[in-house]
Image (cartoon, rainbow, N blue to C red):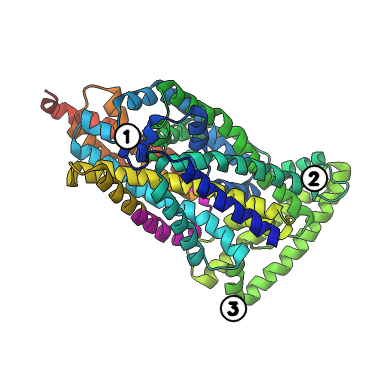
Amino acid sequence: MKTLDWIIVAAYLIYIVYDGLRLTKKSNEVEGYFLANRSLPWWAVGLSVMATQLSAITLVGATGQAYVDGMRFVQFYFGLPLAMIILCITVVPFFYRAKVFTAYEYLERRFDAKTRALASFLFLIQRGMSCGVIISAPSVILSIVLGWNETTTVLVMGLTTVLYTMFGGVQAVTWTDVKQMIVIFVGMGVCLFVIISKFPIGASLTDTLHLAGAAGKLKTVDFSFSLTETYTFWSGVIAALFLFLSYFGCDQSQVQRFLTSRSVDEGRTSLLMSAFVKIPMQFGILFIGVMVFVFYIFVQPPMIFKQDAVTQVQNSPHKAEFDALQKKFDVAWDQRMQAAHSFERVHDTKQNGFVEMNQEITNIRKQATETIKKATNATAFSDTNYVFPTFVTTYMPAGVIGLIIAAIFAAAMSSISAELSALSTATVIDFYRRHINTTATDAQYLRVAKISTGLWGIFACVVALYASRLGSLIEVVNKFGSYFYGSLLGVFVLAIGTKRATGTGAFVGLFAGIASVAVVANYTNISFLWYNLVGCVAVFVVGMIVSLFTRKERA
């Protein structure tokens, strides 16, 4: 990075922290710290809802995912608008009028304390792990830009955000989210413009889209039905619907967002704003990944983007095997480039071998991945998360690099701070205030909130140290959530959807849901998106059966 880039990044970080704290009011009160006194406008809450979900994982992981797998990932969001409409009709007015701090607080009113504690505990575990994955994404960027190891970058990113979140509360989180979304939109727009401007002379956007289409990168809808396939129309409309219902309706990090709204209607509007802006925005981010793929048709990319892994294999007994693959890769890329130039003239991939050479490059990368796994004794390896950062730091001009790095920082900080705020809220409200000290002052509760923020930040940093080794971060974070989300949704369906469910039924059903997902995950090849449906159905069915035998506790 050049001096100009450092100035842009530093100016952004200083301003965003200052501005967030400047706009914080009454953070010395419990309701002010956790819910902003329910006083925020719908547009700020809407942008905060989007920012909480739009982490650096989206910018880093989704672009890398599109480079490897094309636009198919956008199907994941097809169920989002329907989920938001359902939640606006049901959950938003329900929670808002209940005057709760956390979603799980209601479960005690409807069922009992043990069901509330279990649901909140499951949220804390899965969200703590997911927060670690969110911290891992910008750490990938910093490790490339600064040459630091990932441990150092994880600690810098995680602990810096912990300090910022501890003092500002949810108001600081929300108002910084607003600015961060602006930075993200501007950064991605500039990035796409620069990528297209770097295409070789004579390669029009139409030509490059034909190339991307020939390589299968523009396929956005797959109507085939398969429980083992992650990204299809049906998994997006059905399985992901249950994920979004749970995430936006039962996850404290999102419930806390719309509970800060000034009214029920403004809470609804904030969710609908996210519903109908998210898909076009995600499409644009994936399209950037596809354009990076097209750029690397004409400019040779690394065979493996994770350079420290390449260094490890070069210093191992597998060096000769890796070098042989590199030579094959060089030849295949050159042949694909020649075929691409021919394709620009005749638009016929069958005649010039472009598709075959592209598949050959994919196969060579898979072989190189297996070689790295052998050299490093790793059970899994993926360089997906390094594709976009490598491109940005190698080919973007001075100033643009700083802007994009600031956008990635913005995405990371908005999500990390929101997650830590939600974790702290659930810890204090559902456990400390409920079971440990029910009569403490606001000052005491806020002191515990700040301590819990720090502890959860440390936990997330530990998770982050391992997260980047698990594959595409955009998939990892959704896998973490899918182990729990369906079951949490199921217990709220029991609570809100039927009067016959009992506390014991909900409690046992919640265990049954988690167990059913564990069985499906370990003994079948069903895609993780369907875990949400499995967990929800298991909780509801088992919960209702148990409730039949424990009906007296409702009397």
For the residue labelled by badge 1, is the local secondary structure a helix, a strand or a loop? loop
Disc 3 marks which residue? 315
The segment highlighted magenta reads: 454-475
Indicate which disc, 2 or 1, sits on the residue closer to the N terminus: 1
Q: Residue at x 63, y 40 (%)?
A: 185
Front-lying residue, 341 or 3 = 3
Indicate which disc, 1 or 3, sits on the residue closer to the N terminus: 1
For the residue labelled by badge 2, is the local secondary structure a helix, a strand or a loop? helix
Total numbered circles:
3
Task: Classify 10 Å Cα crowding around label 3: few (below 14), some (14-19), many (20 and above).
Answer: few
Which amino acid type is shown beneath numbered disc 2?
Lys
Mark 3 or mark 2: which is in front? 3
Provide residue 453's location: percent of width, then percent of height: 36, 51
Which quadrant would residue 244 be assigned to in this image?
Answer: top left
Provide residue 183's location: percent of width, then percent of height: 61, 43
For the residues bearing labels 1 and 3, Cβ distance under 8 angstroms: no
Provide residue 247's location: percent of width, then percent of height: 42, 37
Which amino acid type is shown beneath numbered disc 1?
Ala
Mark 2 or mark 1: which is in front? 1
Front-lying residue, 79 or 98 = 98
Q: Which mark is residue 350?
A: 2
Q: Which mark is residue 369?
A: none
For the residues bearing labels 3 and 2, Cβ distance under 8 angstroms: no
Which amino acid type is shown beneath numbered disc 3?
Asn
Task: Classify 10 Å Cα crowding around label 1: few (below 14), some (14-19), many (20 and above).
Answer: many
Q: Which mark is residue 103?
A: 1
Task: Classify 10 Å Cα crowding around label 2: few (below 14), some (14-19), many (20 and above).
Answer: few
Which quadrant would residue 132 be assigned to in this image?
Answer: bottom left
Which quadrant would residue 462 be assigned to in this image?
Answer: bottom left
